[in-house]
Image (cartoon, rainbow, N blue to C red):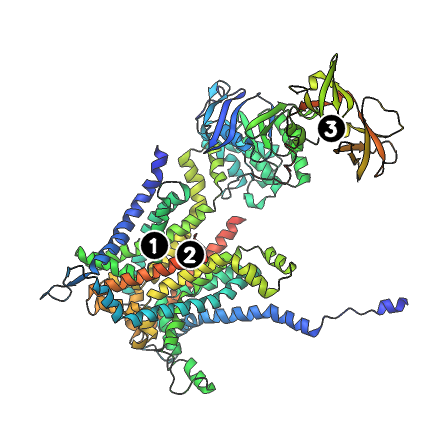
Amino acid sequence: MGKIRTPYLLLLPGFLFLFTFFILPIVNLAQTSTQTPIAGGDTGQYEQTLRFANYLDAFLENREQFGRSFLYALIATVLALMISYPLAYAIAFKSGKYKNFLLVLVVAPFFTSFLLRTVAWKQILGEEGFVVPTLRTIGIISESTTLTSTAFAVVMGMTYNFLPFMTLPLYASIDRIDPRTLEASGDLYANAFTTFRKVTLPLSMPGVVAGTLLTFIPAAGDYVNAAILGSPNTKMIGNVIESRYFKIVDYPTAAALSFTLMAAILILVTLYIRKAGTEELV
Amino acid sequence: MSFDASSARGDLILTRITKEYGDFKAVDDLSLTIAKGSFFALLGPSGCGKTTTLRMIAGLEEPTVGSIHLGETDITTTKPYQRPINTVFQNYALFPHLTIFENIAFGLRRRGIKDVDAQVNKVLNLVELPHLAGRKPTQLSGGQQQRIALARAIVNRPALLLLDEPLGALDLKLRRQMQIELKWIQKEVGLTFVHVTHDQEEAMTMADTIAVMNEGQIEQMGSPAELYDNPKTAFVANFLGQSNLIKGTISGNDGDSIVADLYGQKISLPKHRSHAVDNSIYAGIRPEKFRISLLNTPVSGNVLGGGHIEDVSYIGVSTQYQVAMPWGQELIVFEQNDDGVAPFKKGDAVNISWEPVFTFALRGDEDVTAGSEVNPEVLDEE
Amino acid sequence: MSKKTVDATIPTIPLTARFQRWFGRNLIRVYMVLAFTYLFIPVAYTFAFSFNDSGKSNLIWKGFTLDNWKNPCGAPEVCTALANSIKIGLLATIFSTILGTMIAFAIGRHKFKGRSTSNLLIFLPMATPEIVLGASLLSLFLVFKINPGFWPTVIAHVMFCISFVVVTVKARIASLDPRLEQAAMDLYANEFQTFRRVTLPLVAPGIAGAALLAFSLSFDDFIITNFNSGTVTTFPKFVYTAAARGIPAQANVIGSGMFFLALAIVIAGQFVNRRKAR
């Protein structure tokens, strides 16, 4: 009898915690999202009126930032994939005895605070940094062009910050590929490109799916890169939610935006997983 | 101590054991007695239920119905750690985080035995690896790991030692060597060994008694020689070595012998070697019992005429022939290369003959291919 | 005739083929150098500017000094923030590792009704953007009139670390050969002894890895912390607030210090693993 109860006893404390501090808040957030200000009340006082139009208002008012969030996150994810794939492949197959060392190197930048590194990029790409003057001297960018406070800087910062989330799962699934299957493909008249397309890539698909999700999800909700490296013109939905909460104290709109963001991500993720055909992510 | 070693000793008796997984019957109404001190082999292809049987004896599975007794003690539902039974696992299952010494000492320590050092060293000497005591399992070769797994089990002096495909991971040469060593150790320590394998040669080399299992049941049980010389079913005839099975009917009686008609040609066989239930039979003859002769040579015993040599394969100690018979069947014949006679050539017209005492007869409604299409060497782990 | 065979030269490989071979062999190396340069530029920059004799604003290089390293707490608040981050990180690590490991054992070692729902509940927090996690938790605290601060931050960190712990430990449990536990039972170890002597030691590296991951996630978190910490300053929060006017060089010292410390732990861990495998 004890055997049947054991798993539930093990789950109980953790799930109780997750229920209280994850499920309950989400439910509460849903509740907040349809509230309206109390007539004549102070700032920050709201009552439940089930005003679902909050969602429409919030979305229409901020559709630009929504679009930007998903666009930036998409570009950053694709860039991270393009940078990470060859890197993960090289570590898995071409690094010999340095494999573990190189893996540590991929994770190592993480040990310096994420914010410190983002601030460092701001200064490197800024007017006083070495990149802008160099590019100006070579003539790649004009005298008036700057790199910070641009969409370029924001996307680059996001790509940079989420790169290990892409590289590590990619590495894990490429490393599992038996190199003999690649040789077999070559033996069966496939050239290097065909081998990659027909053997390597399909076999590494679980890593691609996991990596893109682990990059895309935090990227879409991020506001730190936009806040530090961007300008008012590169604001993402995260920035809006943050300022609704702290500066404007407009909880219902912030909640509606959060919910819309979460729902949009969950729908995209579900569609993506369906398409990619990998269900064992967890 | 959690069990009393003296009471739980004696023969192992399985009574009407069935093990079901959903709709699938892995073991089907199996009864079996394994005598104390014997080397017993459970032989069969993968999926035949032999490993499930072993796991039920070890206590890792519980039978759906039936009982297991060790001597007088009922151990059907006791936990594995309450049974005086130890297992040498497939792929050994040595604890990777413990040294060889601690691996072997594991069982002794759990039972609270005092002179752990002395006992571990003694058993390390028995398997001739005392110098490896301080190493970790991953630093050992396959053969060494195998011996340590054995030492870890026998140091507990169990009433029964279970071996689950213990040699499957070793290469052929090492396997041969370990087969002989295992048998020697069994005699040395005087324990009951129950050995599960799909390798008929391994079973025949080591075991006193073999039970051939198929689809959850025992097809036949006996000494290696009994099983080989006088198989009761087509499955056993094919799974243990090769057999030529020729369709025929019983046409008469001649004292202790039966006369049978094989496609119009009369042969005889001893009555006690017939397992047929009616007149329809398959006559079985092992390939090495056949003799081949050219048409004009005098022959004795049973003779089947009208054959043609279809194929000749020279394999050193013997030559293997395929002989096409007039009724369309190809018979396999092994001839020892010991008489200096030039081998037969493809196309030669020949007679096939053999001594009647080597003939066995199976029921005529058997599936002659049973047990032959499973290649035990290829179908490895279950 | 014989002379001719002696003279036969070793056939040379055509130049184009040799070039292709060189290219194929070295392109990947060049690529790796470039990729790692990209990864390390900000780290190197942070490290370099930790030696800047900067005064208040650490924006332009003004000269080399060791003063910042000698006195990392020189800038106001930086060490308070660091101490808060470490305290929160340790507490979050302990709780999330315990809770997460229990869940991992339940899901990884048992078959029970609701197992796939459990998996979903673990997956969801990882698929939810941090800003939603942070904002929703803050809303809940506000409803119950709990002021954001130290403990709400710890709770928030435990919440988002649990899933990562579960996934890490579960992977380790899944790679465990069930025959090892069966062997222990066969060798007279009861359920508890089997867990303590075999299962736990074998899963321990996974739990240690999960704890390290939890700590680094907690230590580096900004978004969720920003929502739930109120007036309590953590190290990332300090950097974010200071970023507008230029962060003090002492923050670079601490960032670089963390980098080398973590690197040392990882390398030591690998070394221990290698020694153990011997």
Classify B61 as above or below A100: above
Labels 3, 2: one chain: no
Q: Relative to residue B278, is residue A133 drawn left or right?
A: left
Q: Position of residue B69 (x, y in %)?
A: 49, 21
Q: What residue do we see at 64% from left, 24% from top?
A: B208
Q: Name the secondary structure under disc 2.
A: helix
Number of the label disc, if any, that sits on residue B286: 3
In the image shown, does B39 or B262 lie closer to the viewer?
Answer: B262
Q: Relative to residue A146, is residue A240 drawn left or right?
A: left
In the image shown, does B65 or C6 lie closer to the viewer?
Answer: B65
The residue that label 1 is drawn on is C124
Q: Which quadrant of the structure image shows residue C65? A: bottom left
In the image shown, does A156 or A95 lie closer to the viewer?
Answer: A156
Name the amino acid type tagged 2. Arg
The residue that label 2 is drawn on is A274
Name the amino acid type tagged 3. Arg
Q: Position of residue B310 (x, y in %)?
A: 80, 38
Q: Position of residue B119 (x, y in %)?
A: 54, 31
Q: What residue do we see at 43% from left, 53% from top?
A: A279
Which chain hosts label 2?
A
Q: Position of residue B202 (x, y in %)?
A: 65, 32
Give the quadrant of the C terminus of chain B: top right
Q: Nearer the viewer, mark 1 or mark 2?
A: 2
Q: Residues within 10 Å of mark 1 (few under 14, many from 20)?
A: some
Q: CA distance from mark 1 to mark 2?
A: 17 Å
Which chain hosts label 1?
C
Q: CA distance from mark 1 to mark 3?
A: 66 Å
